[in-house]
Amino acid sequence: MSDLRLATIGPLLTADAPAKAAATLALPVDLPVDTGAIIPAPAGIPGRPARPQLVPHIRLKPPSMRTPAGIAALVHSIAHIELNAIDLALDICWRFPGMPEAFYRDWLRIAQEEATHFTLLRKHLLTLGFDYGDFDAHNALWDMAERTRHDLLARIALVPRTLEARGLDASPAVRAKLVGAGDHAAGAILDVILRDEIGHVAAGNRWYRFLCEQRGLDPITTYAELAERHQAPRLRAPFNLEARRAAGFDEAELQALLGPAQDTGLSARPR
């Protein structure tokens, strides 16, 4: 494959989860980029394994964290997020033409870091006696990709700057839960993921502001409008403000986030 954007489609269509991660990691980072090519949408995006079964989020009932299955189920849920994140980063590369070359190279790097995260988590799952696919999962992340497939600004606003930023908020509590249950290896993997995800959200912030400036839009009011239009999850405190600042959210954005939501719970729910 001679073009980076075209090359991302192969891993995106790959159904087997470990093979998808491996194919993503094998993509050459120095491929040329045809930034202006309009690529017809191939059938079968994204490739998905037969398992896990995808069910509505409210139907997920993980086992108790006092059991090995409960610990494994939590690790599995993170692995599922990372698998979706591979697809989200690959999808943004081929789908949206007309951005600077650095944009596509950023998202290939992110896809490869997500693939590394998935691989680490799956290997850890195997040490726990389970594998990816052994627990049910949900499709909320890819649902947002579908809702924003025609608008790059919305995709960047609502995937890296919303869904991935929620991961920054949730990471300390999830890590504490796993370490508290005795899974220190999973805690160490989450440290790696948090470090990298700060960079992913930072890339989202950088390209979101690039597009807002290009289109003459106010970043804060535009974000609120996009979140409403595409039914983004309502973000709830507590927020990981240190990580959000490191990821490039400015104080005005953090104040907009904190204003209506700071006395609510950690979880997010659709509007």
Image (spheres, rainbow, N blue to C red):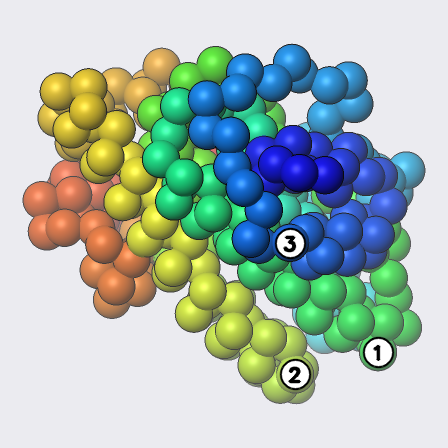
The answer to whether mark 3 and mark 2 are in CB contact below 8 A is no
Percent across and percent down for residue 220 are 16, 31
Callouts 1 and 2 close, C-beta under 8 Å = yes
Which residue is denoted by mark 3 in the rendering? 28
Residue at 81% across / 39% down in the picture?
14
Q: Is residue 70 visible?
A: no
Q: Can see residue 95?
A: yes
Q: Does residue 168 lie above or below 126 as drawn? A: above
Q: Element type at marker 3? A: loop
Q: CA distance from mark 3 to mark 2?
A: 30 Å
Relative to 217, is 184 on the left or the right? right
Mark number for residue 127?
1
Q: Which mark is residue 185?
A: 2
Q: Please tell me whether mark 1 or mark 3 is closer to you in this view.
A: 3
Which residue is at a point 44% across and 49% down the rendered structure image? 106
How many numbered marks have been drawn onto this rendered protein structure? 3
